[in-house]
Image (cartoon, rainbow, N blue to C red):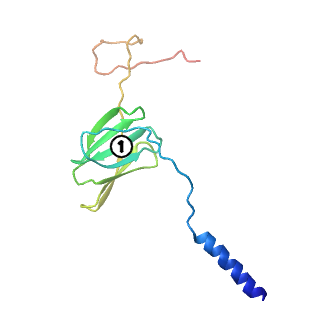
Amino acid sequence: MKTKRTIAVLGIIFVFAASPVFGEAELTIQRTFKTSDVPLDAAVSADGRRLFVLSSGGRLMVYGTNGRLEEILHVGEKVDQIKSGPRGDILFLISSQKKTVQMATLDFVRPINTAGSPSMGPPDAPVVIAVFTDFQ
């Protein structure tokens, strides 16, 4: 008798556990990125500072957190998926047609304003080295 009761209780638990439970969900659009090309895939950098959008024609558009387009890179027309790597500067480029996965690193070069900084040499030199020795 105890065995039948245990089986009946387990059956009831199984029925309720197997039933889907739906909670309330809300969808809020935070930002819309308007692209000039047809978007194929998108990925967010691991550090959350950039959005990568792969578009038709093998173009990779890089957006900043402010929604501004920072860069457009050509990654090849055969790339059809992108995935973000474990750091903010690594991106995986996937081509189903070529059966390849490429790991790419992104280096973002930013100009530094050195106007008014102490320096030596001609002002139109291609390289300026600024030395700060007064840090305590």
Closer-to-camera residue (75/6): 6
Q: How many marks?
A: 1
Q: Position of residue 135 (x, y in %)?
A: 55, 18
Residue shown at the point (38%, 18%) measured from the top left: 113
Residue 47 lies, with reference to residue 103, above or below; the image says: above
Residue 10 lies, with reference to residue 86, above or below; the image says: below
Q: Amino acid at mark 1?
A: Phe
Quadrant of the image occupied by residue 68: top left
42 relative to 46 in the view: left or right = left
Query: Can you name the residue that lies furthest to the bottom here?
Result: 1
Q: Position of residue 29 (x, y in %)?
A: 43, 41
Closer-to-camera residue (80/76): 80
Dot 1: within a 10 Å radius of its alpha carbon, few (fewer than 14), some, or many (20 or more) residues?
Answer: many
Q: Considering the image in quadrants, where does the N terminus appear?
A: bottom right
Closer-to-camera residue (70/42): 42
> Can you identify the residue that label 1 sits on?
52
Closer-to-camera residue (107/68): 68
